[in-house]
Amino acid sequence: MRVRQMLNRPGGDGIPAPRPYAEAQDREAMRQLLVQGRQANNDSYYLHVGDLNWWLYYISSGTNPWQHIFLWDGLHAGEGLRGWALLSPQWGAFDVFVHPRLRGSLPAWQMYTWAEERAAAILRSQGKDELRTIWVASGDDLLIGHLEWRGFSRSPHYTIQYRRRLEGPVPVPELPEGYYVRRLAGERELSSRAAASQAAFASAMDADVYRRRYLGFMRSPVYRPELDIAAITPDGNVASFCNGWLDLSNRMGLFEPVGTHPDYQRLGLGRAVLAEGMRRMVAYGMREVIVCAESDNLPAQRLYQRAGFQPERRLHTYRKPLVGPKVGWSGE
């Protein structure tokens, strides 16, 4: 109650407004905060650094995501970030990650509220009527309480995070005759890789735009060609794929995305690319790996369980209508 009273007191105990993203050094500071959050292992959810890379250099590559990133610096030189926010107008969403030492504190709620109100203003100007925040862990009672107080409610849709320990040999499924698994052979296989992804995710995007987007990702500073794994058909086409990511500090890998062209499903190719990806992660010293599946994607859930992953937690989306009176502290 005391925190809510303080939040409702205009100008009281506030933190400075954040600054916009400025340079690549900021990106590294954002990653470091995520690494520290995972090390803290509290009830808050922190993205894997690979998720951030994928968001910024592939999913949001055509929308200039940098203009919607805001950072709260530490109080002292060399302290690192207190938190950062990523607003995603194209998804009607915002996300905030605060330093683990600030979990549940007044500055944390002020950061969340600032990002919420900034995102809401952008969406209202675009004529949208709903705001979302995603990646809310089911056990994060502090954040859930704050969001509900601010007028958010839980969506029935959620994401399941799976985890697998990388101990001992990784079983390699037997492939149909003529199929094999390897890393993608560079840009000469761009069209085949993009076509497999577009079909796997049933994207209505123009095929040429889809290819250009993946080419931009391949040429980005975060692309790891040795972890872009593909299952190849006897006639040389990409049939299944996965991208692997590494958190070297926490020794945790991530797969994002994972997919199989509809023409080649139910052949064991998804498990085969995951197995090769895990083999490579072990060589980099990873001790475990995570992957996510949507709550309504039963084929993906079955694939990950067959590959040795176990469900670990649910990640929820919270929604708020952008109509009616404002709720709680305004931050101004």
Image (cartoon, helix red, strand yellow):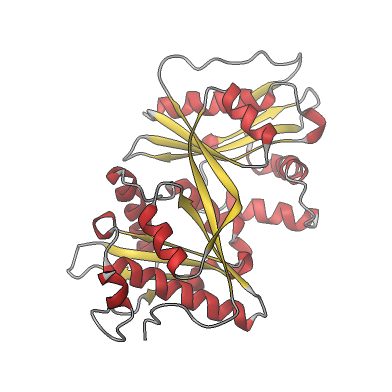
Tell me where residue 286 appears, x and y as whole percent.
39, 30
Position of residue 212 measured from the top left corner of the image (x, y, whole percent):
70, 56
Q: Point out the image quarter for the C terminus.
A: bottom left
Q: Say left or right for 163 vs 332.
A: right
Q: Residue at x 40, y 19 (%)?
A: 167
Which residue is situated farthest in the left direction here?
Answer: 76
Please say if 180 is above or below 215. above
Look at the image and tell me whether residue 21 can be seen.
Answer: no
Vertical placement of 265 versus 221: above or below? above
The image quadrant that residue 160 belongs to is top right
The image quadrant of residue 61 is bottom right
Q: Residue at x 47, y 72 (%)?
A: 116
In this rendering, does residue 233 appear at all? yes
Q: Which of 272/219 is in front? A: 272
In the image: residue 293, left or right of residue 193: left
**So how many labels did they put on this image?**
0
Does residue 47 lie above or below 125 as drawn?
above
Please name whichever residue, 262 or 328, is drawn nearer the observer in this view of the structure: 328
* Residue at 46% from the left image edge and 78% from the top image edge: 327
Depth order, front residue of 142/272: 142
Residue 217 or residue 77, whichever sits in front: 77
The residue lying at 35 percent from left, 57 percent from top is 142
Quarter of the image that includes the N terminus: bottom left
Q: Does 326 sit left or right of 207 as displayed?
A: left
Classify residue 91 as left or right of residue 77.
Answer: right
Residue 110: image location, x then y, percent: 34, 72
Q: Is residue 40 above or below residue 19?
A: above
| Rendered location of residue 214, percent (x, y) | 65, 51
